[in-house]
């Protein structure tokens, strides 16, 4: 988090633009802000009704920000108005950064997507797989397939999270082993994972997992740098992401938004918020991070997340090569697999590319013209998405714990598509 908050240049990889679409973007920029009033009113209502403390958003067309909106409070109890430069816990938005780091190493020829991870992280070799229907963590068989980098990028490695499936054998084992402990570094986390079986044979199922933390360790091993140092040198500094880090400096602590949760975890439609100062653990982000979590450890701002999304969109210099970006937005899963969370509705049209979900066919809660969209979100309700086909994107920043699937995220995308697509 450096004094120059507006610097930074994108790397020199170029993607040709489209004159007609650029003209459309210019017209959009020239339009009155009244065009976006319907979106602003909808988001304002989410705050006024008590679903969110505050919210900030940006809409992007042809890599240009055509609308910004900031409303509500960064700290309800202290009545601190939310600003666009407030720092927010982005949790799984961190996965996009981690995926970009791995892909940069792939482009440089340092690693291959189909290489076994054990070449770099030997702790993850010689794995065991939990038998289907096992009631004991020791009921395992040897894995037939090595975990590859691609498996980790697509959450098909067989690893779990120990977070979304309470009552299962692996959930209990991950909790007992304290896999997510903030008190050990990424190398230490790998040693703990080595003691646990996989949920399934690599490549055969999709399960959200700690795979991005393994990828963070991979970056450390291959680059010879601490994960945070590599991210700063290869991503944050080139893109001018001056406020994205694993730790908030003491002199910037007042910029970190308070974190809230809904009054009823099982009913996201019930208004009301409770403050959660000790999540994900007491003192998080305000002290040096021992585990620099590639899956969920970063704080960032609206502007920084916009810069990252812009750098992946066609029509200008990009962080990654065009062929890499094309693969990022292409389904990497085996036939029949798709994104699926426990106890959540199935959505066969949402598959997975290299590090992020890809919408092959819209579901009932998706904008009807959103096919091709690349997206993901974080545990505290931050979301990002961009559609290379339509050359539009959006970023939403807020701080509602377990808010990633709440109605406001769907509302934001729905209205954004209606406003941005001619």
Image (cartoon, helix red, strand yellow):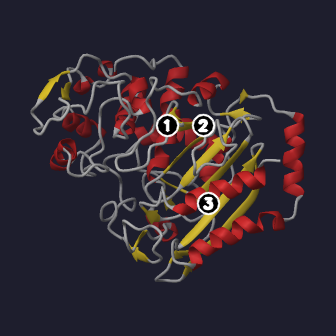
Q: Position of residue 249 (x, y in %)?
A: 45, 61
Is disc 3 placed on a helix, strand or loop?
helix
**Lateral position of residue 333 relative to residue 148, left or right:** right
Residue 256 appears left or right of 211: right
Residue occupied by mark 1: 348
Q: Earlier in the sequence, mark 3 or mark 1?
A: 1
Image x and y of residue 192, in percent: 19, 38
Residue lying farthest front?
A: 364
What is the distance, in whole Å, between disc 2 and disc 1 at their CAs?
8 Å
Residue depicted at x 39% and y 45% = 341
Q: Residues within 10 Å of mark 3 (few under 14, many from 20)?
A: some
Residue annotated with mark 2: 361
Q: Secondary structure at mark 1?
A: loop
Number of on-image labels: 3
Is residue 147 left or right of 304 when viewed as pictured? left
Query: Mark 3 highlights which residue?
Result: 411
Kindly indicate whether the residue at mark 1 contacts the one at mark 2 (C-beta within 8 angstroms): yes
* Cα–Cα gap, marks 3 and 1: 21 Å
């Amino acid at each position: 988090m450096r004094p120059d908050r507006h610097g930074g240049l994108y790397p020199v990889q170029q993607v040709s633009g489209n004159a007609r679409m650029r003209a459309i973007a210019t017209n959009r920029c020239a339009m009155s802000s009244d065009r976006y009033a319907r979106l602003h009113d909808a988001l304002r209502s989410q705050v006024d009704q008590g679903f969110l403390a505050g919210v900030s958003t940006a809409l992007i067309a042809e890599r240009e920000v055509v609308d910004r909106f900031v409303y509500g409070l960064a700290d309800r109890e202290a009545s601190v108005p939310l600003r666009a430069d407030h720092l927010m816990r982005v949790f799984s938005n961190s996965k996009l950064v981690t995926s970009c780091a791995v892909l940069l190493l792939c482009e440089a020829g340092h690693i291959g997507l189909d290489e076994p991870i054990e070449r770099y992280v030997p702790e993850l070799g010689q794995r065991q797989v939990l038998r289907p229907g096992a009631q004991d963590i020791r009921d395992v068989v040897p894995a037939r397939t090595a975990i590859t980098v691609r498996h980790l990028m697509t959450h098909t490695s067989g690893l779990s999270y120990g977070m979304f499936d309470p009552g299962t054998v692996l959930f209990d084992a991950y909790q007992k082993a304290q896999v997510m402990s903030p008190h050990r570094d990424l190398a230490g986390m790998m040693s703990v994972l080595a003691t646990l079986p996989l949920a399934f044979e690599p490549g055969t199922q999709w399960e959200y997992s700690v795979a991005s933390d393994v990828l963070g360790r991979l970056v450390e091993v291959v680059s010879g740098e601490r994960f945070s140092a590599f991210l700063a040198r290869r991503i944050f500094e080139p893109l001018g992401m001056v406020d994205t880090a694993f730790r908030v400096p003491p002199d910037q602590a007042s910029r970190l938004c308070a974190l809230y949760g809904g009054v009823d975890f099982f009913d996201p439609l019930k208004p009301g918020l409770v403050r959660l100062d000790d999540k994900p653990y007491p003192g998080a982000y305000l002290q040096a991070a021992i585990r620099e979590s590639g899956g969920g450890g970063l704080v960032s701002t609206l502007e920084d997340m916009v810069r990252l999304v812009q750098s992946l969109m066609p029509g200008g210099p990009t962080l990654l090569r065009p062929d890499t970006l094309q693969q990022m937005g292409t389904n990497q899963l085996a036939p029949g697999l798709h994104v699926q969370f426990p106890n959540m509705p199935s959505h066969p049209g949402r598959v997975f590319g290299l590090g992020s979900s890809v919408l092959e066919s819209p579901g009932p809660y998706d904008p009807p013209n959103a096919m091709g969209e690349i997206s993901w979100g974080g545990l505290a309700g931050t979301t990002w998405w961009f559609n290379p086909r339509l050359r539009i994107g959006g970023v939403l920043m807020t701080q509602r714990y377990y808010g990633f699937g709440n109605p406001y995220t769907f509302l934001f995308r729905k209205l954004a598509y209606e406003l941005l697509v001619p």
